[in-house]
Image (cartoon, rainbow, N blue to C red):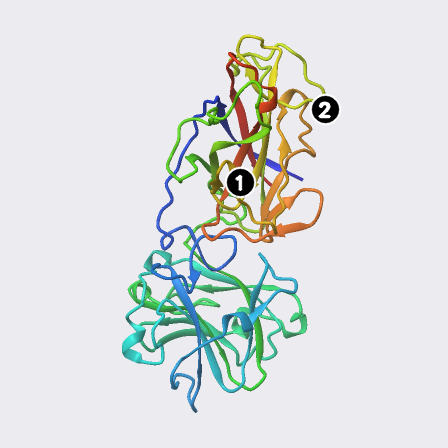
Amino acid sequence: MLKKIFLSFIICVIFYCVLNSQSVSPNIGRQVYGLYSEIFLGAKFESANNDDSVSLKYMTCNSERQSYNTANNVNFAGVIGTDNPFEGNNYLKLTASANQAFFITFNGTDYGSSANRTIGQRDMSAYYGGMIKFHARNANNASDTEVGIRIAANNDKIVNLSELNYSVSEGSQWQELTMYLTSANIGGSLNVSQSELSQVSAPFLVHLPSVNNTISIDNILWIKANQVLNAAASFSLTLKNADGSQADKITWSTAAWTPANKGSWTPSLQYIEIDALDYYESGWCAQIYTKNTDVSFSSPIYSGSFTRQSVSGMVNTIKTNEILYMRWRIMKEADITNGNLIYDANWQEAWSLLRDISVYDRGEEEIRFYDRRGYKWNAYQTLYGALPEDKKLRIYFAADMNAARKGFEYKTNSIFVEYYAE
């Protein structure tokens, strides 16, 4: 059942478009910081020259848990699991070959050196009073397996899985676990102060005390206090040119158009960037349609009639019973090369015909879903794709230039992107 939280954005095309825009704050400090997430903005594994770059390290422990030898880089590809992840396309699958600890660390240098551990520390104090949520499964030692964070060089704040109510008997199922970023004496508390959180060098650690101890981890989120996760908190659209700069209208190049060589379906020179990422278990949907027959919105008004099979688009401003058909497509990348769209073949996102609200089937047509599995690029199959690195999507439009007539202008100011949460 869909609970509609309407945020409708009027997209005016000529050919003419005005959209609400919203700047994105730095990742650290967002309401939800995705430390290991294919959905939420946040950390990026081994990304050069990026403040959010993280690495995965492991150390073999000595007799005491906090005595480690030199840190080693984990072969990241070797610890990726793909079978039934909680969200996105993969998860971390950790197995100990000795008494070992695994760290997600902001510092890409030798983490085995105490002096180097403070180089990459980050100020995460804005999350004090909040929590770290993550999902775990296949842990075979709940009482001794520890999770937590590292402050500065050696100050580990940890709890064991039993304290987080992890159930070994249900170990094959993903279980949501919560560590509280507080000094309060409550279950699951990491007993950490706000000032200590200003010196986080490892925002997540796992200690596996014995050979063949295992655990799978997914969806690690740092969450601010009082953040509601079960509804989307923001939805913004920004109109951009192909080079990423902001635009104020959607246009097509007519440089190569002639009555004898009109061309066919031609991509627009601009795209719409979607940022709607502050959700959790529930997903969100977006529908796209025109209101070309609605006198309260449209100019010009389409004077013809639509049927369920009709395609909408831009209206001929003189012969208003004519429509220049349009399509739309969601893509991962913002890239147009020589008038052709470049897209990830793994998505296979097909062009969808643009429909008018007067004949639009709200229950079926042109619905695109975001939820913890990723972006559902095929509405009629269970096909999900991992999101691009910046966790945003782009809407491109195309127009049927073969139907355009010399000396006429085509436009619409009533394309709507309608958002609602499940």
What amino acid is at disc 2? Gln
Residue closer to the observer: 338 or 341: 338
- Residue 66 visible, this angle: yes
Residue marked by disc 1 = 341
The quarter of the picture where the N terminus appears is top right
The Cα–Cα distance between marks 1 and 2, rounded to whole angstroms, is 26 Å
Picture coordinates of residue 288 (x, y %)?
Answer: 58, 31
Q: Is residue 235 visible?
A: no
Q: Residues within 10 Å of mark 2 (few under 14, many from 20)?
A: few
Q: Amino acid at mark 1?
A: Leu
Contact (Cβ within 8 Å) of mark 1 with mark 2: no
Classify 150 as above or below 401: below
Task: Residue 354: give x, y in percent of width and height.
Answer: 62, 28
Q: Residue furthest bottom?
A: 63
Quarter occupied by residue 115 = bottom left
Name the disc covering residue 309, or none: 2
Q: Quadrant of residue 105?
A: bottom left
How many dots with numbers?
Answer: 2
* 1 vs 2, front mark: 1
> Circle 2 sits in a helix, a strand or a loop, which is it?
loop
Most foreground residue, 9 or 342: 342
User: Which percent across, then down, holds residue 206?
Assistant: 48, 74
